[in-house]
């Protein structure tokens, strides 16, 4: 009889232990994936999955909700750096010799600031056009970066 009591007691302890340990389960693959992607705890990931139903939706919505605004200054800096390495884009055309346009583009890239008044560039129309072409190319690239950012990319 004592042996049956010991066996019964062992069974009860085993059932209690299983019940307790099953409630302390490890995170699911989805919870771990969301936690790793967003840098949050697995508990927070589980809550997001419960709320959105799908790990991908949870990640996308979380990123949208906590994503900083588009950084115009960082985009402009990146665009200026990118355009400086390209050279005159011929958007204003040129005659036989494009050296004035190219010099204006390069001067603007090297000096790093826009000039609203073309007469500030001197007496050469081609030089002024090259500088203005650079400014327009930078503005266009910033607009492209803004669009890319709105579509979830990190353009700069």
Image: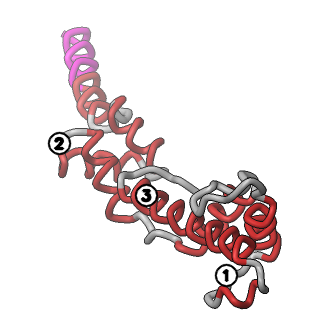
- Mark 2 crowdedness (10 Å alpha carbons): few <14, some 14-19, many ≥20: few
Whichever of labels 3 and 2 marks the residue nearer the N terminus, that label is 2
**In this view of the protein, which residue sits in the foreground, 127 or 78?**
127
Mark-to-mark CA distance, 3 and 2? 26 Å
First along the sequence among labels 1 and 3: 1
SS at circle 1 = loop
Residue 27 in the image: state x and y as whole percent.
36, 35
Query: Which labelled disc corresponds to residue 53?
Result: 2
Give the class, few, some or many, for how many residues have Cα within 10 Å of label 3's Cα (few <14, many ≥20). some
Q: Horizontal and vertical percent for residue 69? A: 43, 71
- Residue 2: say if magenta: yes
Separation of residues labelled 1 and 3 (CA atoms):
24 Å
The kind of secondary structure element at disc 3 is helix
Indicate left or right for 80 with 21 as reference. right
Residue for point 56% across, 69% down:
136
| Numbered badge on residue 149 | 3
User: Looking at the figure, which quarter contains the N terminus?
Assistant: top left
* Residue located beneath label 1 in the image: 114
The nearer-to-camera label among 1 and 3 is: 1
Quarter holding residue 56: top left
Which residue range is magenta in the image?
Answer: 1-12
Where residue 4 appears, as percent x and y from the top left, is 20, 10
């Amino acid at each position: 009889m004592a042996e049956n009591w010991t066996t019964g007691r062992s069974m009860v302890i085993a059932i209690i232990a299983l019940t307790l340990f099953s409630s302390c389960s490890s995170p699911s693959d989805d919870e771990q994936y969301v936690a790793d992607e967003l840098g949050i705890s697995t508990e927070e990931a589980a809550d997001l999955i419960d709320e959105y139903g799908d790990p991908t939706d949870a990640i996308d919505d979380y990123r949208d909700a906590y994503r900083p605004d588009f950084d115009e200054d960082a985009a402009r800096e990146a665009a200026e750096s990118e355009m400086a390495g390209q050279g005159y884009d011929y958007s204003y055309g040129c005659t036989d010799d494009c050296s004035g346009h190219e010099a204006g583009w390069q001067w603007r890239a090297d000096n790093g600031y826009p000039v609203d008044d073309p007469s500030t560039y001197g007496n050469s129309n081609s030089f002024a056009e090259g500088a203005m072409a650079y400014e327009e190319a930078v503005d266009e690239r910033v607009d492209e970066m803004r669009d890319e950012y709105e579509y979830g990319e990190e353009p700069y």
